[in-house]
Amino acid sequence: MKLNDMVLVSVDDHVVEPPDLFQRHLPDKYKDLAPHVIRRDDGSDVWQFMELQIPNVGLNAVAGRPVDEYGMDPTQYEEMREGCFNVEKRVLDMSANGLLGSLCFPSLPGFAGRLFGNLEDKQAAQVLTQAYNDWHIDEWCGTFPGRFIPLAIPGIWDPEFTASEIHRVAKKGCHAVTFPENPVPLGLPSLHTDHWDPVWKACSDEGTVVCMHIGSSSQLAVTSADAPFDVTIVLQPMNIVQCAADLTYSPIWKKFPDVRIALSEGGIGWIPYFLERLDHSYRTHKAWTHADFGSQTASEFFMDHVILCFITDPVGLKLLRDHIGVDKVTVEIDYPHSDANWPRGPEKLMGEFEGASLTDDEINAVTHLNAMREFHYDPFSVIPREKCTVGALRADAIGVDTEPRSMSKRDKVEHEGPFTIKDVTVTA
Amino acid sequence: MKLNDMVLVSVDDHVVEPPDLFQRHLPDKYKDLAPHVIRRDDGSDVWQFMELQIPNVGLNAVAGRPVDEYGMDPTQYEEMREGCFNVEKRVLDMSANGLLGSLCFPSLPGFAGRLFGNLEDKQAAQVLTQAYNDWHIDEWCGTFPGRFIPLAIPGIWDPEFTASEIHRVAKKGCHAVTFPENPVPLGLPSLHTDHWDPVWKACSDEGTVVCMHIGSSSQLAVTSADAPFDVTIVLQPMNIVQCAADLTYSPIWKKFPDVRIALSEGGIGWIPYFLERLDHSYRTHKAWTHADFGSQTASEFFMDHVILCFITDPVGLKLLRDHIGVDKVTVEIDYPHSDANWPRGPEKLMGEFEGASLTDDEINAVTHLNAMREFHYDPFSVIPREKCTVGALRADAIGVDTEPRSMSKRDKVEHEGPFTIKDVTVTA
């Protein structure tokens, strides 16, 4: 496999919503209610919604900036690369990275889409949720057919509404929905209850993938208030193992075996160890805990229902064939976040594939075929396959400047001592 | 390497303290204060201490029992295999498992030894701590020279006392001390403070290994109150990654580079993924978090100071040579806990070593040479090496009955529905 012949589909990128998001998708009577962008005295742009101000922290929009401009400070639109919020520019940035398709997570409403639930008027909350989804599906994704996998947000405060929204957007071709990896920290019933059954049933009926992104429970991995923030950065992606164990022992997959759940930004290098731990625990303790996976092992049951996703994972890829399985793994770029594999994603990925001695079939499965199958995504029906390769897309994007550029518009405030959780504002 | 030629040293087993623990190691004036065993109406034996009753839950003493007798119910001494609490029988059980040396964690005072700190009279708390350590070192370990690696408990409420105790027991040849993997859930200052510096300095001066056992912060991995307890069982050992990240970014190893910390029962299969995550985060974020590991990578810094320990870890062993390093890994048996590799430890380990294609030198490093070096343990000065092998020890233990035997003395109460955290009592 030559680098230029790869076809890349990313199941985890992020959109920074543009200020005009709600202009074309909301009935007039709700327009005053909708979030709108204001510039604060400190020069940062925030979304004003009810009494809330929602900033876009720097780390969430650093693509194209030098690493010494990374940080947790709120930012303004002019300090972001335009591809963060402008879909024309986004597609150019995708092409410059050789990326054919992209699934984009929300920023403003939170990964779990919970923002609009703050409204007491739940009818209005539903209308805003639907407007958001319409903007995302029809405008962000719809402008460039074949280049995006649409992803709806739920109305997390109402499982029945969420189910109806899953059905509604499925008719528009959207077969993915975000969901918190643990609803409990959000004050909602756990994955072990039947509260969410309408959601799982709708996903099962529509073939809709549930995307549980790291951090979507809004619970950060914090060991102590005075721990350097690096500790949280290291741990946050590893925290998803809690969700993986929860899902395995939840009733979801027993009641709705067709539901597929993606562990977005979950990585894969920890999976083989987790699978061994699952099976060891099941063998050792099922006699008294009465856990029951029928004729399967616990790890088989888990792997049958999950979709795994990674950005960079050399060790995981080495364990792919013998310990994880080739059919469950998909790639992520994570543009424009700080972990993004951009603009040299193809080079990085190919290096890891070669390090793991993957075959061409294995590379094709991981780079696009698995994602296309699991997310009902068929770009080749819109764009000829020969125009979908890394080489072809990059040829279309010649002239896109991908060099890191300082984009700071304001003086940086130097921080004293190590950053801790107390020094950062995070919205998930 | 033939199975019978292996030499096995376990750096993680557990002692169930015998009822006469305090009889020979406590001044008379404190004897009434000491914990003592009473039998409750339900037939279980508990330690009575002040107003507290501390049970020994079944899972902590299941060696030799069939798996359908595993569970979280409190137990009585007659329901345990004698090797749990009787050192003569323990050594026979070790030999029957081909095990030369064993480091035994406490049960009664908690992994972090915090029980005695409940006393308002801190002088008494110190005396009880010292009595416990004297019993452990002189009696439990001292009865069979060369067969145990002694392990002291700290006086976790007082770093200065703990430091003095580390010095005191070092004079008796004890070069290991337990410590919580995170003091914060115990209401104590974090690993990021200088509160514990006297402890680290004493360990540095004496070459004393700090053993941080999973669960020693008394914080269980609970995703929600209604999650099946299986979730916690699966996650508990994986939780140690939080401690690993904390340690890497704590000031401990920068101030006291000679301190070695063992991640007891921490496993190794997750380490390569964690190391990649450490290095990725450091590269990406150090410019703004100001993390600084000098000329090292974050993973090199971590690996230089840690001792890794595993019970069963096929994937981890496959990654040993290229991704973890042979010199930092030690084996554990975990007798008499439910995860124990007993009585077929040598067979299980050899199977995993063969599966990972380890060389004889690598097997020797992992099975005993690393533990001997790191814990200053020199059994061959007491027992000729040829008597220390799996084959020689098992020959000495012919006649020890290792078949699982029902030991229930009481009717089992059948549990309705899945076990959750609400149904179990756990003391760490």
Image: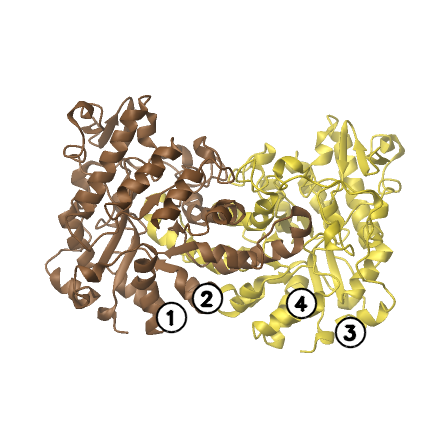
Chain colours: A brown, B yellow
Task: Tell me, yes or no, whether dots 4 and 2 are on the same chain.
Answer: no
Chain bearing mark 2: A
Depth-wise, is mark 3 or mark 2 nearer the camera?
2
Task: Tell me, yes or no, whether dots 1 and 3 are on the same chain.
Answer: no
| Residue A187 in sight from this viewpoint | yes
Give the residue type that dot 3 points to: Gly
Relative to A222, residue B29 above or below: above
Q: Residue at x 22, y 69 (%)?
A: A4
Q: Secondary structure at mark 2?
A: loop
Q: Residue at x 43, y 66 (%)?
A: A320
Residue indicated by mark 2: A319
What is the quadrant of residue A409 in the picture? top left
Q: Residues within 10 Å of mark 2 (few under 14, many from 20)?
A: many
Q: Secondary structure at mark 4?
A: helix
Residue indicated by mark 1: A355
Residue indicated by mark 3: B391
Q: Which mark is residue A420?
A: none
Relative to B359, residue A243 above or below: above
Distance Cα–Cα, label 1 vs label 2? 11 Å
